[in-house]
Image: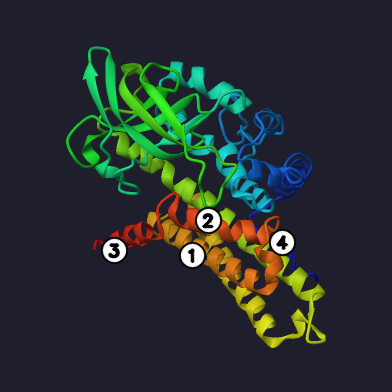
Amino acid sequence: MSLDFDSARLPNKNLTPEHHEWRAQLRRFIDREIMPYAEDWDENGSIPDELWTKSAEVGLLGMGYPEEFGGVTEGIDMWHSIIVNEELARVAVGGVAATLLVHGIGLPPVINFGSDEIKQRVAPPVLAGTKRISLAITEPGGGSDVAQLQTTARLDGDHYIVNGSKTYITGGMNANWFTTAVRTGAEGSAGVSTLLIPSDIEGVSRTALDKKQGWWCSDTATIYFDNVRVPVGNLLGQENKGFAVIMNNFNSERLAMAAAMEALSRVCLEDAVAWARERKTFGQRLADHQVIRHKIAEMKQRINATQAYLLMTCEQVQEGTENAGDIALLKVQSSQTMEFCAREAMQILGGIGYMRGSRVERIYREVRVNAIGGGSEEIMRDLAVRQFGL
């Protein structure tokens, strides 16, 4: 059997014929509407607006969201989401998935903790691809330590007055709403709340962050709040209980990132194997040199281990027995595997892998954002150790 993206995937007994049909349908859409253009989008630093509505039409945006808001829940489980992240990874332009699917971290707090009026106002246009929502947590003075955020929301009658800023906000330049972590109480996690802040109200401004190592086509911004008046009805959950709202989101985000990183590792393996078969040095194929064969073997070994960990963790989530520490360590395992495979694939491809236009080159550039975003490797290890009461 040829060692390619699909054959390098371990068997998954949880997948049904419906899952395989969803993969086939999604792959056709990606191969038609994204794959031929993604490299140019990355070079140009943006994604066309029509991709959101096209994605909505094939069910990509609404998958797993309540039908009353335009989503689809019947027959949908977490494996559908894993397949989405795997298939988009084949494109090897991380900024596409990061921005196109950013509602996956911005919208769930609205669905799970917002009022009925807010849900009806926000969810349908987001799931239809006509409006967008982003998650605004990270601040210039602090990253993964959410409990220490400094953006304040002071109650004034029937409004909160918000002051502060957020940065590295994916989808931030074009978002219509920000699901925003703010401080309404004392220091620490007990004083955090979550507000839905419209982007078009007075006092909200933003600047683009477009000088990035990777994810060039991802819309990234710094957001500023200057005496922004937000209705109290835009509170998501209870005041000073917003930390739970935010944490509720992180496990699913980290699982999605882990699935994507594992798949990106397989892209590296696929391209490295294809090149090793074709390229000749010293009268032999690269694939005939022991040093190259050993690189490929270790890439596959690490990918297998990451897939097994991902499969185990997803099954725990499906059974309701998940452990936040394992999800955190899975993310670390996945980013380390991605980094190793990107490096080894680059070594195998040599000069051609260093040139723009190579999937491996793009993945190599995007290793660090995956190792930092959604919780850095260091924070993830620390979170895991806390599970032992240390």
Looking at the image, is mark 3 or mark 2 earlier in the sequence? 2
Asked whether the beta carbons under mark 2 and mark 1 sit within 8 Å of each other, the answer is yes
Residue 288 point in image, percent of width and height: 76, 84
**Which label sits on residue 5?**
4
Query: How many neighbours does mark 3 have within 10 angstroms: few (below 14), some (14-19), or many (20 or more)?
Result: few
Q: Residue at x 65, y 53 (%)?
A: 92
Looking at the image, is mark 2 or mark 1 earlier in the sequence? 2
The front one of 196 and 278 is 278
The front one of 306 and 338 is 338
* Amino acid carrying mark 1 in the image: Gln
Query: How many neighbours does mark 4 have within 10 angstroms: few (below 14), some (14-19), or many (20 or more)?
Result: some
* Amino acid carrying mark 4 in the image: Phe
Viewer-nearest of labels 1 and 3?
1
Where, by quadrant of the figure, is residue 154 drawn?
top left
**Which label sits on residue 388?**
3
Query: How many neighbours does mark 1 have within 10 angstroms: few (below 14), some (14-19), or many (20 or more)?
Result: many
* Amino acid carrying mark 3 in the image: Phe
* Amino acid carrying mark 2 in the image: Ala
Residue on which disc 1 sits: 333
Asked whether the beta carbons under mark 3 and mark 2 sit within 8 Å of each other, the answer is no
Distance between the Cα atoms at labels 2 and 1?
8 Å
Q: Residue furthest left?
A: 186
Seen in the picture, residue 276 relative to 133 is either above or below; the reply is below
Q: Quadrant of the C terminus?
A: bottom left
Distance between the Cα atoms at labels 1 and 3?
19 Å
Kind of element beneath mark 1: helix
Residue on which disc 2 sits: 258
Residue 229 point in image, percent of width and height: 32, 17
The front one of 276 and 248 is 276
